[in-house]
Image (spheres, grey):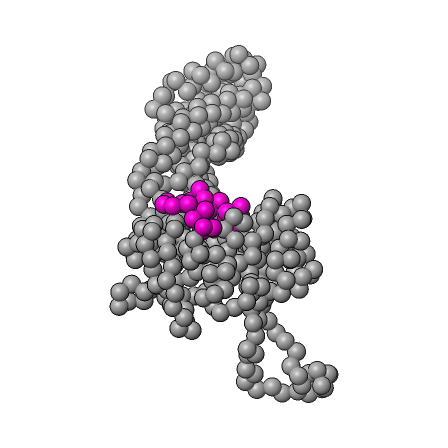
Amino acid sequence: MRVIFSIAKTHLLAKPKQSLVAMLGVTFGIGMFVAMVSLMSGLNNFTEELTMTSSPDIHIYKDITGERVSILEQLNPGGINFVHHPKPKNESQKIRNAFQIAELIRQDPDVLGAAPQLSSQVFYNFGPVQLNGNIAGVDILEEDKLFGLSSKMKAGEIAGLLTTTNGLIMGSGLAKTLSLSVGDNVTVTTPEGVTISLKVVGIFQMGLGEIDNIRSYANISTVQKILGKDQGYITDINVKLVDLYQAKAKAIQIQSIFGYKAEDWETANATFLAGAVIRNIMTYSVSITLLIVAGFGIYNILNMTIFSKMKDIAILKATGFAAKDVSGIFMTQSLVIGLIGSVLGLILGFILSYLLSLAPFDGGDVISIDALPVSFDPLYYVIGIVFGVATTAVAGYMPSRKAGHVDPIEIIRGI
């Protein structure tokens, strides 16, 4: 092995430019792989975290749009019944015994918390203009357990909602649009024409424009008063689990027990999850293509090296080197190129990822972000070096095998 390494070293140093070009091909392939995967994974993780922190693992509500058996089918089951233009019933969205259901759900060891709520579409009066928005009536302490609302407060505290009868915690984008700060009053009008004045006791920022620009939180009793409903009127129950990946199975279980629609986060965010999968596929496809191109470069360089070293190969085999020894020489060259190129590629990838993480990025009103989110997960570096060495090993196998099968007699005769 010492002789094989020595000869491989001599070949690599004999034509340093060729060896350097092969190493740089692997280096840039691995470097771009690490940088692209780190950036895309960082973006996916960031958006997933924002989505998970602003939406429940399971959303329980009364589905009034589901199919129902018509009265004709009840009176004439199995018969030929024709119903044209059925009108929806004036049906309440109220969840009966919502507080008791929430308490039963909290007793499940797989559940972190369950928060009843109701919401209403409203118009915020801004001079002569009315801005569309949404007010969620919540138990603010339970809401904080589920979504960590206290950590997202930009001004004021969630406790202010407990001490103020008509208090309101408003999204940062909405507060900015309305030019409101803590202590100011805002007039709110419901679609039914009910008008009420609320006091801003806090401003939060989730980081998603679709939430920060329209949502506000108030006490359950306040929203019930706005809607003219009784104290038991609740339309939704939000649930957070210990393991969010159990949400689909747990939602089916909750729906079968209580009879209300239970939608898990994967179903609710199916579009986002599909987009994340597509982005990952594109990232890995481009990165793997770069590594394969680098592998072809190594293949061509080793082929050229073998062609130029035919006389050396003949002499080696004539002096007693076996086919596997000659193959080992060129395979060693390929692995050395791959290993050094991969290590340099990891360094380059880390530097590029670090520079990307420092690049300023303005998310505007859509997403709260100051710089590009980059993931420095060690797994990507492990995948990079393994795939880099594996690619060069595969690229070097065929030329090395060819070198091992060279017939020294034919070469010597041709000299």
Residue closer to the observer: 200 or 377: 200
Residue at the far left in the pictured view: 128
Residue 285 seen in render: no
Residue closer to the observer: 370 or 16: 370
Give the quarter of the figure containing the N terminus. top right
Q: Residue at x 38, y 34 (%)?
A: 353
Is residue 324 a member of the stretch shown in magenta? no
Residue closer to the observer: 204 or 286: 204
Residue 41 lies, in percent from the top left, at 45, 42
Q: Residue at x 36, y 30 (%)?
A: 351
Left/right of residue 346 with respect to residue 131 in the rendered view: right
Q: Residue at x 47, y 62 (%)?
A: 223
Q: What span is colored magenta in the figure?
A: 143-163
| Image quarter of residue 242 | top right
- Give the main secondary structure of the magenta stretch: helix
Residue closer to the observer: 21 or 256: 256
Residue 272 lies, in percent from the top left, at 48, 54
Residue 233 seen in render: yes
